Image (spheres, grey):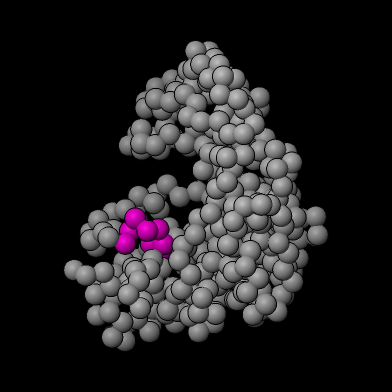
Amino acid sequence: MEAGTEWVCMLKGDGAAAICTEIRRLLDQAVRRCLDGRRVAIMLSGGLDTSIVAAIVCRYSKPDAYTVALRGAPAPDAGCAALMAKALGIRHTVHCMDEAEVLELVPMVVKVLRTYDPMEVRNSLAVYAGMRAAKREGAEVVLTGDGADELMAGYSFAFGLGKEELDAQLRRLWSAMAFSSRPIAESLGMTASIPFLDPDFMSYAMEMDSGYKVGSEVGQVYGKYILRKAFEGMLPREIAWRAKVPIEAGSGTASLPKLFGSRVGDAEYAGRRALYLREDGVTIRDKEHLAYYEAFRAEFGAPRPAERGKACPQCRSGVPDGATFCRTCGAYPI
C-alpha cells in the first residue's frame, strides 16, 4: 500500500474528527493536571510536541520558555522555538551552552542517569542545561513533550512499515521507553511534568488504530499524523508540519563528537582505550565515548559484571533478556 493511502481513507470518515477532538480534550486535561500553582517553565524545542504543550498551557498561564543551543553549532531548534514563543506571546530564553559548560555538565548528567551512552548523554546535556537555566530563574515545574514520538509513531523507522509490524514495533517502544527529564529535574529540585504520559492520554494513544499515526501531507510522509491534524489550527503551519528533529540535532549537541575528538590525541586515546579493555572489560568506541566513560568510572567505578542472565558484550553490565540495547554503555545491537 502506498504511504498515506490508509490514512486518506480513514480521514474521509467521521472517526478522524472524533479522534482529533478527543486528543485535544485529553491533552488539555493532562496539561491542567500539571498546573498546581507553582511557577511553570517549558522546554520549548519548536517541534510539534513541545509546541502543542506550550499552546495548551498558554490557555491557563504564561510560562517562561527555554531552548538550548550549543554555541557555534547548527541549532535549528532556536529559530523554530522563537517563532512559536512569539506566536504565543511568552518570554523565551535561548540558553547558549559553550564548551566549558559542556565539560562541567558531563559528570553531572552521567551521575544522574548512570550511563555513558553517547546518544543519551548528548541529548540529556541539553535537557540539563535548559532545566538548570529555568531553575535559576525560579521555575518549580518544567513541562516537556516527552512521549509523543513513542506513543504516536513519530520516528522515521515507522514510515515504511506495514500495520502489523508497526504495531509490534510500537509495543516494543512502549515497554522500553524512559525519559531523562524526570531524574534530571528531580536532581535540580524541580518537577518534570509530561502531559503526553498522562495515564488517560497514554491509554487512548495505545489503543488507537496505528493507521491514524502515519500518513502523508503534500507528498511527504509524517509520523504523529493525527496529532498534527488535531492541532494544526492552533500552531503555525511550519511548526505543525515540522519534521521530527532529534534533540542532538536540534540543539547542536550532535557536534560533540568533534569537540571531544579534538581534546585527546590519537596515541593517548589508544592507550586509555586499551587500558579500560584490559582492566575493566569495557570496549570504548570513540573519543566522545571515552570522555563519558571516564566520568562514569570516576563516579561509579567500572560497570559490574552481570551475575546471571544476559550481559552486554561491550561493558559486561546486565541487560534484560531479549534486549537489543545496553542502557549503560549504549551498545547496539547486542
Secondary structure, magenta segment, majority class: loop
Q: Residue furthest top?
A: 278
Residue 235 in picture, x, y percent from top left: 54, 79
Residue 37 in picture, x, y percent from top left: 74, 69
Up-down: is 136 above or below 285?
below
Left or right: 85 in relation to 305: right
Considering depth in this image, is 90 or 257 the residue closer to the camera? Answer: 257
Up-down: is 220 above or below 146?
below
**How many labels, in total?**
0
Image quarter of the N terminus: bottom left
Image quarter of residue 312: top left
Was residue 153 drawn as part of the magenta stretch in this picture?
yes
Considering depth in this image, is 162 or 257 the residue closer to the camera? Answer: 257
Residue 48 in picture, x, y percent from top left: 51, 69
Q: Residue furthest right?
A: 137
Q: Is residue 199 visible?
A: no
What is the span of residues highlighted in magenta in the rendered image? 152-159
Q: Is residue 59 visible?
A: yes
